[in-house]
C-alpha cells in the first residue's frame, strides 16, 4: 500500500464533512484547510531512483486522502495526474470523492469505459446523498466502483444502487461531539449488500456508538478494534 497526495486542502460540501479529519488535523497544526496547495510529492508515482520506480509494481495507491481528487481548485493539475496514472498501469489507484457530480468535467479524453487501474469510491453519509450521488454514480463508466458510508450519520437504504458496485465500506465519526452511529444501521447495510452480492466492510465504529439501545463512548484506538471484533465483514460469492 502507498499514499499519494498530489495536493492538500479541501472545502466542506455536505453534512458528512462536519468533523472531517483533514480539517481537524489542520486546525491543530494551524493550517488553512480551505487553501488548496500543490505538494512536493506531486509526481510521486513516476519518481525513480537509479532508473527504478520508487513505488514498486503491484501496489495499491490511495490518492488524495488529504483532499478530494475532483476538487475544483486542482483542475489545472489533474491532467498531469491522469498521465502518471496511465504511465503506471502496474499500480492500482484508489480514491474517494464527495464531488462525483463533476465526473464528466474532470476525466481524461481517453477515459471511454474507464481505466483498468482506477477504483473510484463515492462517499455518502445520509439518505439525501445516497439518492443524489449514487443515482448518478451508478450510471458512470468506471471499471471498479465502491460506496463509502463513512461517516454514516443516519440509517440509509441504498440497495437499489448496489448492482455493479465492488464494495460498500461503513464507518462512524471520530470527534468528541460525533454524531452517533447505530450498530443496527450497519447491520441493515450489510443485509442489503448480501442480497445484492456486494462486498461489505465495517471499517470503524463511531466515537458515540449505539448498540442494543445503549450508547458507548469509544476512544480512537477502539474504533477499528471494536469494528474488527464484530467480525461482520462479508465477501461476495
Image: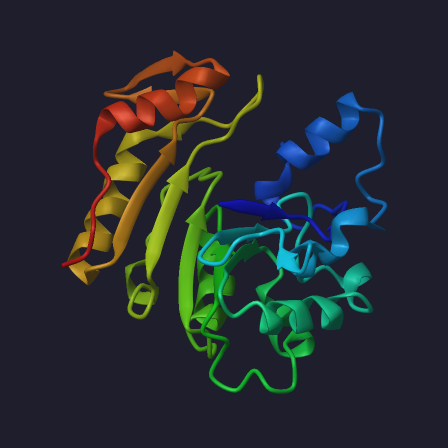
Using the image as rendered, state which of residue 95 and residue 14 is in the foreground.
95
**Left or right of 154 in this view: 88:** right
Q: Is residue 42 above or below residue 30?
A: below
Q: Residue at x 58, y 65 (%)?
A: 100
Residue 39 shows in this picture: no
Q: Is residue 169 above or below residue 208?
A: below
Q: Residue at x 55, y 56 (%)?
A: 95
Using the image as rendered, state which of residue 172 and residue 8 is in the foreground.
8
- The image quarter containing residue 186 is top left
- The image quarter containing residue 161 is bottom left
**Left or right of 11 in this view: 158:** left
Using the image as rendered, state which of residue 146 and residue 46 is in the foreground.
46
- The image quarter containing residue 164 is bottom left
Residue 130 shows in this picture: yes
**Where's residue 42, x and y in %?**
75, 55
> What colouring does the structure picture have?
rainbow
**Where's residue 97, x and y in %?**
58, 56
Q: Residue at x 41, y 22 (%)?
A: 223
Q: Residue at x 41, y 55 (%)?
A: 147
Residue positioned most to the left: 237
**Where's residue 188, x and y in %?**
24, 43
Q: Is residue 67 above or below residue 102?
A: above
**Left or right of 185 in this view: 101:** right
Amino acid at each position: 500500500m502507498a499514499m499519494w497526495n498530489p495536493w492538500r486542502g479541501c472545502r466542506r460540501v455536505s453534512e458528512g464533512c462536519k468533523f472531517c479529519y483533514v480539517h481537524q488535523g489542520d486546525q491543530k497544526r494551524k493550517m488553512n484547510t480551505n487553501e488548496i496547495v500543490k505538494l512536493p510529492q506531486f509526481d510521486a508515482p513516476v519518481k525513480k531512483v537509479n532508473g527504478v520506480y520508487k513505488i514498486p509494481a503491484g501496489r495499491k495507491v490511495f490518492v488524495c486522502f488529504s483532499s478530494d481528487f475532483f476538487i475544483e481548485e486542482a483542475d489545472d493539475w489533474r491532467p498531469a495526474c491522469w498521465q502518471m496514472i496511465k504511465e503506471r498501469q502496474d499500480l492500482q489507484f484508489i480514491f474517494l470523492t464527495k464531488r462525483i457530480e463533476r465526473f464528466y468535467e474532470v476525466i481524461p479524453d481517453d477515459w471511454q469505459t474507464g481505466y483498468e487501474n482506477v477504483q473510484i469510491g463515492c462517499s455518502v453519509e445520509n439518505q439525501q446523498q445516497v439518492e443524489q450521488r449514487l443515482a448518478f454514480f451508478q450510471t458512470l463508466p468506471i471499471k471498479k466502483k465502491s460506496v463509502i458510508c463513512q461517516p454514516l450519520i443516519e440509517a440509509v437504504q441504498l440497495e437499489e444502487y448496489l448492482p455493479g458496485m465492488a464494495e460498500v465500506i461503513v464507518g462512524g465519526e471520530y470527534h468528541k461531539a460525533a454524531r452517533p452511529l447505530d450498530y443496527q444501521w450497519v447491520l441493515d447495510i450489510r443485509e442489503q449488500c448480501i442480497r445484492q452480492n456486494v462486498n461489505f466492510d465495517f471499517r470503524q465504529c463511531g466515537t458515540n456508538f449505539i448498540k442494543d439501545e445503549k450508547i458507548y463512548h469509544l476512544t480512537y484506538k477502539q474504533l477499528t478494534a471494536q469494528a474488527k471484533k464484530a467480525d461482520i465483514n462479508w465477501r461476495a460469492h
